[in-house]
Amino acid sequence: MAVTLQVNGATRTLDVPPRMTLADALRTQLSLTGTHLGCEHGVCGACTVLVDGAAVRSCLMLTVQAEGSSVTTVEGLSLPEGLTPLQQSFKKHHALQCGFCTPGMITTAHALLTHEANADEARVREVISGNLCRCTGYVPIIEAILDARAAYGAGET
Amino acid sequence: MKLPAFDYVAPASLSEALAALRNNEDAKVLSGGQSLMPMLAFRLLAPKLLVDLRHIGGLSDILIDGMGVHLGARVRWCDILEDDRLATAQPLLRAAIGHVAHYQIRNRGTVGGSLAHADPAAELPAIAVACDAVVEIAAASGTRRVPARDFFTGPMSTGLAEDEIIFALHFPPWPEGRRWGFREFSRRSGDFALAGIGLFFDMADRRNANSHIAVFGVGDAAARLPEAEAALDGAVLDVAAIAARTAEVSGDIHASAAYRRALIETMTERALADALARRDH
C-alpha cells in the first residue's frame, strides 16, 4: 500500500505491506536506523518516535496508520553542527553506556520536556518507566533529563 | 516477531466499517492498536483483515452532561488524563487511567480497544464495572447498550459479536461529595496489576451508602464484591473525624485545641488500624 507521511520534515511516499510496523518502515525503507527495535511488542521503549508531536512506540503502530502524519525520529532531533542541549546533557551526566536505549530515551524526554518543561523528578521517573535501560541504572538518565529542563524552558531546543 | 500478513482498510464511516466486518471472515477492528499489535506480534491472532477506525468521526469525544460522562470509543488515555473536567465529573476513572501502561502507550491506547481486549488486569474494565457503566455497541441493525458487568464474560472475552463495534462507554453521574479510592499493586510501574481495587461510596446521615467495590487483576474478569459492599454500607468510616470534632478539647501552653483535635483524628485512625490488624482471621 502507498503511504504518504512526513518524516523529519520531508514528505515521503512509501510502498509497504499492511503488516509492516512504522519502526520497520523507518529502518528498512528509509534507512533511519537510529530507531532501535528491542522487544517488538511494546515493552522496551527503544523504538519510541514522535507522531504528530506525541511520543509513541513505533513497533505498536502500522506504517499505514501513519498516513498523513508527521513523524520525528531521533535523527530528526539532532543538529548537523553538534549536540542539542538534551544530547549535551546526556553526555555530561554519562546517561548512556551501550546506547541501545538512548534513541528511545531522547525521543521520550524530548516529548516530555516539550510539553512539560517543568516536569519534576517524580514525573520524569514515571515517564521514563516505559523505557528499559540495562546499563545505567537510570539515575544518570533522570539527572540528564532534569538538567535539560532549563534549555526547554528557555526555548533553546 | 514480525506480524502475520493481513489486509487493511480504513473506512470513512461507521456503516462502512460495519459492512467490512460483516463481509469479511476473520476481520478485526483496529483502534489504537496498543493491545492488538502485541497480540499480532506474538501471533496469538492472525486476522485476514484489519478495519481501522481512525477516519470515522464522532468517536473521540468526551462528553459530560446531566446523564454522566460519555467516552467515545477512540478516546485515548492521554485525552482522559488531560481533561480537567473529569477531576470532578469522574475522579475515580481519572485516577485509574493514570495507572494504565506507560507514557507512550497512553498516547495511543483507546477506551474501545481496552474494553474489547478485556484483559482481566486492565483498569478501564474494572472502573466500568465498579461504576455500573454501560457499553454502547454499534451493529448493522442499530446500537445496543450492555451493562459493563454483563459485557465482560471472561479473560479476554466479551459479549461483542464479530461484526459489531464498540461505540462509546457511558458512566452515570458522579454526585458531589462521593468518597472514592483506587489502588493497584504491580511489581514495576506500568505493569499489569497483580491485584487492584476501585471503590466509592456516598454519605447519608454520616453513614456510608451505595458502596461499590470492584476488584481486578485477580481472576477471569473484574468483579464487584457484594459482601464487602454490604459490610461497608451503613458503616461510619469517618469515625476519626467525628471523634476529633466531638471530643472536649482545651488548648494550653503545650498545644492548641486545634492541634489536639488533629492529633485525636490521627490517633483514632491509627488505633482503629491496629484494631483491624488484630482481627481474628
Image: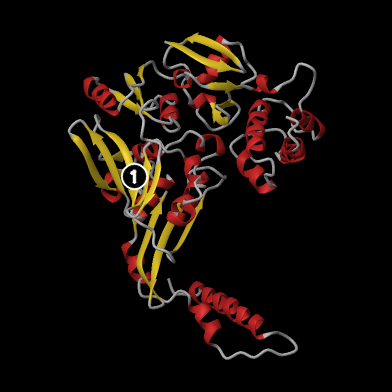
Q: Is residue B194 visible?
A: no
The answer to whether residue A56 is above or below residue A138 is above
Q: Quick check: B118 left or right of A52?
A: left
| Amino acid type indicated by mark 1 | Leu
Instruction: Identify residue for label 1.
Output: B169
Q: Residue at x 55, y 10 (%)?
A: A29
Total numbered circles:
1
Where does the image place residue A95, in percent across and percent down from the top left?
75, 33
The answer to whether residue B138 is above or below residue B273 is above
Q: Quick check: A53 left or right of B45?
A: right
Provide the secondary structure element on which disc 1 rests: strand
Where does the image place residue B246, in percent across and percent down from the top left?
52, 87
Where does the image place residue B159, in percent across and percent down from the top left?
25, 40
Q: Residue at x 63, y 79 (%)?
A: B263
Which residue is at the far right?
A92
**Quarter residue A101 falls in:** top right
